[in-house]
Image (cartoon, rainbow, N blue to C red):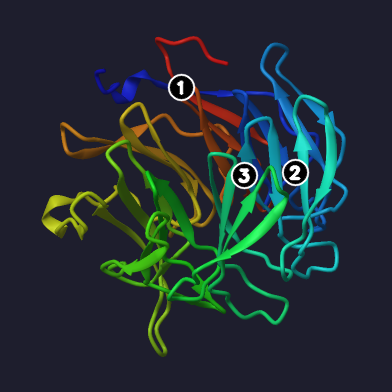
């Protein structure tokens, strides 16, 4: 399939959320978009569950979660949506685990985590969810890797990660779980590790090239990890700096591409939405050296080997949640001085939109 040109990408504003939202979680189940929890405009975790209905371009409020939470980890296991940890109304980590049945429209409480945690990263395969790391109630990072079995409603401990961390990035490729970066207290970590489910063992991969926070992370169809932009941590008496660096790790061969084999983004930015869409890496919005949040969008063309500007988002924002469903990038909520209710979709013009 040919890679679309920059002119073929278009944004459309869709129905807005009922209120501004940030630190919410997005999930796709059965090709439909769900928005789980988050913080409201007053910064309070909420228990809302919303479904976007493309036929009428409306949000439908579904039965609320038993536990209000923000920053929850969400895994979809067939018709079930598993909601794990996060931050509760008292601004402390949660151990509560709840599951929503998308066919029955009902919530059920499930076996809790061993301890309360926020900043968990989760991935799923074959009726099992794998939860990595997290920050405990003592604000210390965890090295725990645990597996949830849907049929048995049981959490089982797997061998711990070599590096404790939270807010890490995980990806399941075949029988391997890749865990990249994350944080320890306020410090970024460069650790990159992989867990082999068959041998039940961890291996250490070459570290991330530098310490950056609020980066964009995507995995392409060739199993390559793209680590984009972010805020580069300053040293003693040095300010952190926005960067446009692009680093790519080849999981098939186990190395980072050399700098001459990668191309930096046009704009230095952090805390932006990003995804791989129709063979192109897309970055949208975020924060940079501009005085306000950004609306600019760019996409990497793999054959031309350059970043190209796309049409800007209608609503500038950072900290937005995003997801790709049916070759469309949906960007929901975020912050533009206050939490935003914006919902926009990026699509290729030769296709019908949602």
Which residue is more in the foreground, 218 or 318? 218
Q: Residue at x 67, y 65 (%)?
A: 118
Mark 2 nearby-residue class (10 Å; few <14, some 14–19, many ≥20): many
Image quarter of residue 308: top left
User: Which residue, given by chain and number where applicable, does mark 3 sit on?
Assistant: 75
Please identify, in this view, whether the residue under mark 3 or under mark 1 is nearer the observer.
3
Q: Quadrant of the N terminus?
A: top left
Q: Residue at x 76, y 43 (%)?
A: 99
Q: Earlier in the sequence, mark 3 or mark 2?
A: 2
- Across and down, in percent, residue 197 comes to 42, 55
Residue that extends furthest to the bottom in the rendered view of this protein = 236
Image quarter of residue 111: bottom right
Q: Mark 3 and mark 1: span between their CA atoms?
A: 25 Å
Residue that extends furthest to the left in the rendered view of this protein = 260
Q: Earlier in the sequence, mark 3 or mark 1?
A: 3
Mark 1 nearby-residue class (10 Å; few <14, some 14–19, many ≥20): many
Which residue is more in the foreground, 184 or 348? 184
Mark 3 nearby-residue class (10 Å; few <14, some 14–19, many ≥20): many
Residue 140 appears in the picture as rendered: yes
> SS for tag 2?
loop
User: Which residue, given by chain and number where applicable, does mark 2 sit on?
Assistant: 20
User: Which residue, given by chain and number where applicable, does mark 1 sit on?
Assistant: 347
């Amino acid at each position: 399939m040919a890679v679309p040109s920059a002119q073929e990408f278009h944004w459309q504003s869709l129905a807005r959320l009922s209120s501004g939202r940030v630190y919410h979680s997005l999930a796709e189940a059965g090709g439909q978009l769900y928005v789980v929890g988050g913080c409201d405009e007053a910064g309070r975790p909420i228990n809302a569950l919303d479904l976007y209905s493309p036929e009428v371009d409306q949000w439908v409020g579904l039965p609320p979660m038993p536990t209000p939470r923000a920053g929850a980890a969400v895994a979809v296991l067939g018709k079930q949506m598993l909601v794990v940890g996060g931050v509760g109304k008292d601004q402390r980590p949660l151990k509560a685990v709840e599951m929503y049945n998308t066919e029955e429209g009902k919530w059920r409480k499930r076996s809790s985590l061993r301890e309360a945690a926020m900043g968990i990263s989760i991935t799923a395969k074959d009726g099992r969810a794998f939860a990595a790391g997290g920050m405990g109630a003592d604000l210390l990072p965890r090295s725990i890797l645990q597996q949830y079995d849907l049929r048995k409603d049981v959490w089982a401990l797997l061998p711990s990660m070599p590096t404790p961390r939270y807010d890490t990035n995980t990806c399941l490729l075949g029988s391997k779980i890749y865990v990249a970066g994350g944080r320890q207290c306020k410090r970024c970590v460069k650790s990159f590790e992989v867990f082999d489910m068959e041998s039940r063992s961890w291996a250490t991969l070459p570290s991330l090239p530098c310490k950056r926070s609020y980066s964009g992370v995507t995995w392409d169809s060739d199993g390559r990890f793209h680590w984009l932009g972010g805020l580069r941590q300053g040293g003693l008496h040095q300010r952190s700096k926005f960067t446009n660096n692009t680093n790519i790790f080849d999981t098939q061969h186990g190395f980072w591409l050399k700098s001459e084999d990668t191309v930096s983004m046009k704009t230095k930015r952090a805390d932006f939405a990003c995804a791989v869409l129709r063979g192109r890496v897309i970055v949208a919005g975020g924060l940079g050296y501009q005085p306000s949040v950004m609306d600019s969008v760019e996409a990497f063309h793999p054959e031309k080997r350059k970043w190209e500007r796309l049409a800007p988002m209608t609503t500038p924002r950072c900290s937005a949640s995003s997801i790709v469903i049916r070759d469309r990038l949906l960007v929901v909520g975020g912050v533009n001085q206050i939490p935003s209710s914006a919902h926009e979709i990026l699509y290729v013009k030769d296709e019908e939109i949602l």
